[in-house]
Image: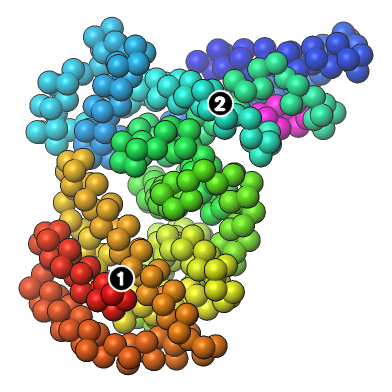
Amino acid sequence: RIFRFTSDHEVNLKILLGVAMERGELSLEERNSLLHASTDDVVQRVLYDNYLQAQILSQEVAVAPDRNEACEDLMLQLEAEGELERAVEFLPSSEEMAERRGRGEGLTRPELALLVTYAKRSISRDLLESDLPDSQYLERDLERYFPQAIVERFAELLPEHPLRRELIATIVANDVVNSQGVTFVSRLVAETGATAAEVVRAYRIARDVVDAGVRWNDVEALDGKIDPELQNQLMTGVDWLVETTARWYLVRAPGIRLAEAIDQARAAFRELSSVIEQIGPESWREQREREARRHIEEGVPEVIARRHAFQDELVHGPDIITVSRATGRPVLEVARGFFLLGDRLAIDWLEQRLGEQPAKTRWQRWAVRSMEDDLFTIRRQIIETILEQAGGRPIDEAVDAFLEDRAAPYGRLHRFMRSLAMEGVTDLSQLTVALRQLRTLVG
């Protein structure tokens, strides 16, 4: 596999240098010298691609039982496309997948490795049928694909590469599967009704807005330094942030241009990420400080441990940034309002209980996702109402005034939440009623 991919890189590099030769910018002798000098660079890039695939396979094996149904759906899709013959590839039939599901089992590592290849091929084909490979923003992927010495000299020729669209589609398809897993695209297509290209566009926006590349690289640097299971937990945390943010862009901002979305949110997200640990309620901070200290004792560098501990709350980043832009209020002030509401209205507690609900079937997973979206929406609607009525008051005072003006529904909500906490959340119907109680505050 390494030799095959190395050969692909060399072929694409030769094509680019051929364009330079046709334009008289390169002699045959210079071409051969550049190819020889680029060999080590190409091999390193191919080895890293294999490293990423091994990494995502380890993560996929860990969640294989939970992804049984999603993998079955993907195989059915590939069969319908005429891409996959399970019997030929020794992949389990639908009947065997159902039996494994009953035993709490999923695909094995070799089976997942095979499915990864098919998923990448399917996504790449779907991308070629869209306008995503034409995005000027993604030309930077071509710059990272080719050796740096070649890019420095022939960067202006990259848009003229005869296989430009095919290369971008392949690079992006590899990226999304290597980082988010074999069923990420197919799951979101099924859940949202979006196209594969729209899912990939949302993924790419999310990846760059949250600076996932930096977060992934920092965790990868811990190879051999911490327990592999802990490292996998750290990596999965970043993946979850990317997936949740991608879902937001897919549902809330469909069709937005890559560069526009990233330029609008990246700086604000960095600002929010840098101070997230300072703006939440005290009890919230203490809980996450304990988690950070635990990971530090397990060998995780303090910066990474603290970033991981507070990372979950960044899931509200796109909503916070959007409200900030709409109201003209500073990002940090809006974030403070989000966290105050999460604490005062027990929304954080509801989100935790929601995350604990069993979701073994696709319908259960979709129900949980739908309710999660509803909780995000109601928090955003309440903070928008508060800021509309704030009249320039600081956010803490504005929240207090809002709840005082709604003393009756707020009191009912408080009593309901206390009763629910005593009774315990055992199914989604209780959370559905809780959502209705929350809506009375803005209804």
| SS state under label 2 | helix
Q: Which residue is mark 2?
A: 169
For residue 404, the mark is none
What x and y, as percent, mark residue 97? 17, 25
Counting other residues with Cα less than 10 Å from the Cα at mark 1, is it few (<14), some (14-19), or many (20 or more)? some
Residue situated in front as seen by the camera: 17 or 389:
389
Could you tell me the amino acid type at mark 1?
Asp
Identify the residue under disc 1: 348
Query: Where's residue 331, x and y in %?
Result: 56, 72
Residue 441 appears in view: yes
Per the image, is 364 magenta? Answer: no
Residue at the spot 57% in from the left edge and 32% down from the top edge: 132
Is residue 178 visible in the rendered structure shown here? no
Q: Position of residue 54 (x, y in %)?
A: 43, 31
Q: Is residue 146 magenta?
A: yes
**Residue situated furthest front in the rendering:** 443
Q: Residue at x 25, y 85 (%)?
A: 410
Quarter holding residue 5: top right
The answer to whether mark 2 and mark 1 are in CB contact below 8 A is no
Magenta-highlighted residues: 142-151
Instruction: Pick the residue in front: 205 or 306.
Output: 205
- Helix, strand or loop at label 1? It is helix
Q: Is residue 268 above or below residue 181?
A: below
Looking at the picture, does residue 88 appear above or below residue 399? above
The answer to whether residue 157 is left or right of residue 341 is right
Choose the circle earlier in sequence order: 2 or 1: 2
**Apparent side of residue 373 relative to residue 255 in the rendered image (left or right):** left
What's the residue at 48%, 86% (across, down)? 390
- Residue at screen point 17% across, 65% down: 431
Q: Amino acid at mark 2?
A: Ala
